[in-house]
Amino acid sequence: MGYKISCLKTKGGELKELLSQGIQILTTIPKRFRIMVMPEGSAHMKQFTFRMKHLALGAIGGSIFFALVIALSAYLLGTWVAERRIASVMQEQHQLQSQVVTLSQRLSNLKQKLTDLAHTDNLLRQGLGLPIVNEEARSAGVGGVVSSEKNGNDPNADALAEDIAELEREIALQKESFTEIQVGIQHQAEIVTHTPSIRPISGGYIGSGYGYRNDPFTGKRKEHEGLDINAPIGTPIYATAPGVVKVARYLTAYGNVLVIDHIYGYQTVYAHMNNFAARVGDKVKRGDIIGYVGRTGRASGPHVHYEVRLHTRPIDPMDFLFDTFAEAKR
């Protein structure tokens, strides 16, 4: 059966009529349902009768059952996903812990190598006359601070981070120290380069050494401030280190004498020359010919009188004959 509901105007009588029609429709809904089933090939018919309230309760019960099934399935699925995630996180954590242990071992090896390097560093500093870096200074390092960031609740990771920060400070300190050593080595190399280090002549023999001796002219004991190397007249005399010729002239006792200024306070003196091969102001290199052996001035025979002075004070030239001239030329 069907009922047509038209659009009604909002008037009191029409609204009352609409409510009346709705009640009539509700009263016409049957309270029972009967279902008749006749199997194919059979003359008997089966009948099933349902009450409306039973059908409603069944529908409600089915809905609740399906809702419970869906909720349970969602819960089980969520639990399974969570367990898989937990297992994955635990596996990653185990791998990270293994990596931390490996890195800790490698870091320990690096720290030992750095300790050995620090020992070598101090030996080099001692050799260069630089102050050594004590353990307290190395522990303090230079610049920077230890990071305050923590890695969750993993004490191994936190300790590793602190060790790395400490290693970074020590490496920075070592780098700074090596820079200072490099400057010191360059300075020492410059000093060595300009330090007298070869014989002033090739060949010859030492006739008189540095120190007190009997003067060959007066017989009195007198300090001899240089080294006399006997050689034939005309034997070349060589500059024993780079420098600038400061003096090249005749003096009564020294005869023809030439003085070379070297940096870092060194001077060398070459006396009794026969003649000069360099003039005042000339820049000379180690091994350059600056004159020739003679017997000018107070000389008992042909030789070169050779002096080494440090800040104008004479010192023993034998301490500066590190090589023969031939060896120094190679």
Image (spheres, rainbow, N blue to C red):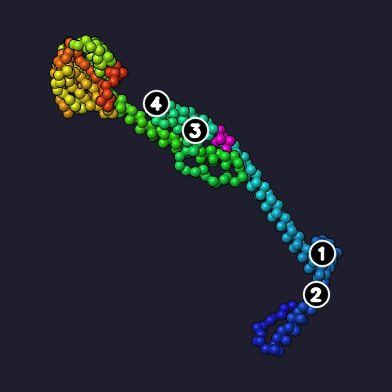
Nearer to me, 213 or 244: 213
Decide if residue 324 is in sight here: no
Of the numbered discs 1 and 2, the one sitting upstream in the chain is 2
Q: Nearer the viewer, mark 1 or mark 3?
A: 3
**Is label 4 or label 1 in front?**
4
What is the three-letter code of the residue carrying label 1?
Met
Q: Which residue is mark 2?
A: 30
Looking at the picture, tell me which residue is in the foreground, 134 or 149: 134
Q: Tell me the quarter of the image containing the C terminus.
A: top left
Q: Amino acid at mark 3?
A: Glu
The Cα atoms of the two marked residues, 1 and 2, are separated by 23 Å
Circle nearer the N terminus (4, 1): 1
Q: Nearer the viewer, mark 1 or mark 2?
A: 2
Tell me the residue at 78%/68% (across/down).
56
**Cβ atoms under marks 4 and 2 closer than 8 Å:** no
How far across and how far down the image is residue 240, in percent?
24, 21
| Dot 3: element | helix
Under tag 2, what secondary structure?
Answer: loop
Residue 67 in view in this figure: yes
Q: Is residue 287 above or below residue 40?
A: above
The residue carrying mark 4 is 127
The main secondary structure of the magenta stretch is helix
Which residue does the image show at 54% across and 41% down from the upper left?
161
Q: CA distance from mark 1 to mark 3?
A: 105 Å
For disc 3, the neighbor class at 10 Å (few under 14, some 14 to 19, many from 20) is few
